[in-house]
Amino acid sequence: MKLRFCHFALLIAVAFAVDTATAQTTKWKEMHKVKRKETIFGIARDNGITIDELMDANPEMRQPGYELKKGDFIFIPYPKDTATANAAVQAPVVEAAPGKRKSEDMSRRAIKVGVMLPLHNINGDGRRMAEYYRGVLMACDSLRQDGISTDIHAWNVPEEADIRKTLKDKDAAECDLIIGPLYSKQVRALSDFAAEHGIKVLIPFSINAPEVETNPCLFQVYQNDADYNDAVIGRFLEKFAGYHAVFIDCNDTTSKKGNFTFGLRRRMETMGRNYSITNLKSSEGNFAKAFSSSMPNVVILNTGRSPELNIAFAKLNNLSMNNPDLSVTLFGYTEWMMYTKYNLDNYYKYNVYIPAAFYTNPLSSKTARIEQKYRWNFHEDMLQALPRFAITGFDHAYYFIKGLHLYGGRFAGARGSVGYAPIQTPLHFERAGSGGYHNRSILFVHYTPEHRVETINF
């Protein structure tokens, strides 16, 4: 199923025409009776106007505490940018040879974006991707304020779908960028289609996509575990040179962190760097013997689970009380960000570093702003999940659409090329051989003893 949206605050290929002479003499196009569950965002989207245009026609919407209610009558104005939107639709296209990307300057027209993800309310995948897509729409709204227009098409592509049927839609071949898919089995068909039509594909989540190694059209955001662990190990060894490493066995038979801790220990051994190993079940005396009194200590657990982390904090608190001069830093895992609410004081106390591919600072004004806009547009809060999917969609779409606007088909996602400071998800891509591009961005989230949270980007 294809969903075509002429949505809020976007200069897109509109699905209706407005007589401009009439628009000059009439303040609004029609009166609209509000239906159950309709939102300001949805009404603006469905009528091809911006939220500001809708509110200008209905000033009461700007009053504090205003609520849109079923049965209300509101004015639907003519879109102010009809002429601009139509000009974008009619912009001349430079034809290219089959299989090659059209070469016109994308800064002079709307950028055509396709979203091919499960967009439904049937299961968690659909709900998460629907929220991600909402973030894409919000990014397009923000980009319009910078004069960047977009033409968005969205297709519901659930797990059981044959994406080849979706790709037969004539609008698919016109895209400059396709965001998707979510499932590994759908990558090959989309990869072949993108290569044939010269379309850039942003694969937003962690799936197996060997086609990235051979297809220069593909951009994969999430790194596989082996590459990610290798990158984190390298940054760890740089950051904690001069530290004594203490590995704590947490007796968690379900843990998958052994690949990281084993790889880190092997690298340390080849570099001639010493470390010690202890156990959560060790006696206080044996536990203390694993720590250095002459060097700062960095502690690594072999699990990301909360129960073992709590026990480790209890052991470290007792150790610090009996050895107040010991210097202890704790190096964790992305999952630990979910436990911040309960462990923040210990994170500060033990100078915790958490490696991650994303970080949402709940105290940031940028985070508060996007959460507020999401709530206002969609009448609900974002899902309580990490990453925050709407913010992920916002960051991805803003970065890529602006990159295409600046560089056209030459955009390669290099560090610093877009000039965008992400809210949650840093991106910088590097070429995978002669193929596509992998995101190589990682960061360390640092909880300082001065009760600050800082991010170190690599």
Image (cartoon, grey):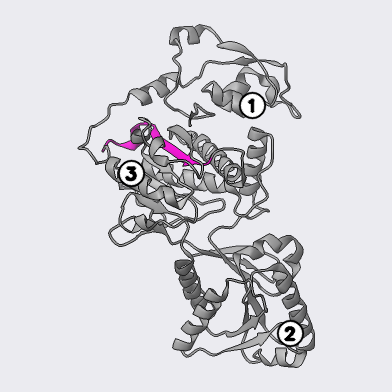
**Label 1 with label 3: CB-CB less than 8 Å:** no
Mark with earlier residue (3, 2): 3
Residue 200 picture location, percent across and down: 36, 45
Q: Is residue 130 left or right of residue 219?
A: right
Q: Is residue 285 above or below residue 350?
A: below
**Along the line of sight, which residue is nearer the eye, 205 or 144?**
205
Provide the secondary structure element on which disc 2 rests: loop
Residue pointed to by mark 3: 194
Residue that appears at 46% across and 69% down:
226
Residue 453 picture location, percent across and down: 65, 63
Residue that appears at 58% across and 11% down:
30
Tell me where residue 375 sits by quadrant: top right
Q: Is residue 180 above or below residue 346?
A: above
Under mark 1, the amino acid is: Ile
User: Is disc 1 surrounded by few (<14), some (14 to 19) or many (20+) residues within 10 Å?
Assistant: many
Tell me where residue 261 sits by quadrant: bottom right
Mark seen at residue 281: 2
Question: What is the span of residues highlighted in magenta in the rendered image?
Answer: 103-118
Residue pointed to by mark 1: 40
CA–CA distance in space, label 1 to label 2: 57 Å
Under mark 3, the amino acid is: Ala
Q: Is residue 73 in view from this perspective?
A: yes
Mark with earlier residue (1, 2): 1
Provide the secondary structure element on which disc 3 rests: helix
Q: Is residue 330 magenta?
A: no
Mark with earlier residue (1, 3): 1
Under mark 2, the amino acid is: Lys
User: Is disc 2 surrounded by few (<14), some (14 to 19) or many (20+) residues within 10 Å?
Assistant: some
Indicate which label's residue lies in the foreground, 1 or 3.
3
User: Is disc 3 surrounded by few (<14), some (14 to 19) or many (20+) residues within 10 Å?
Assistant: many
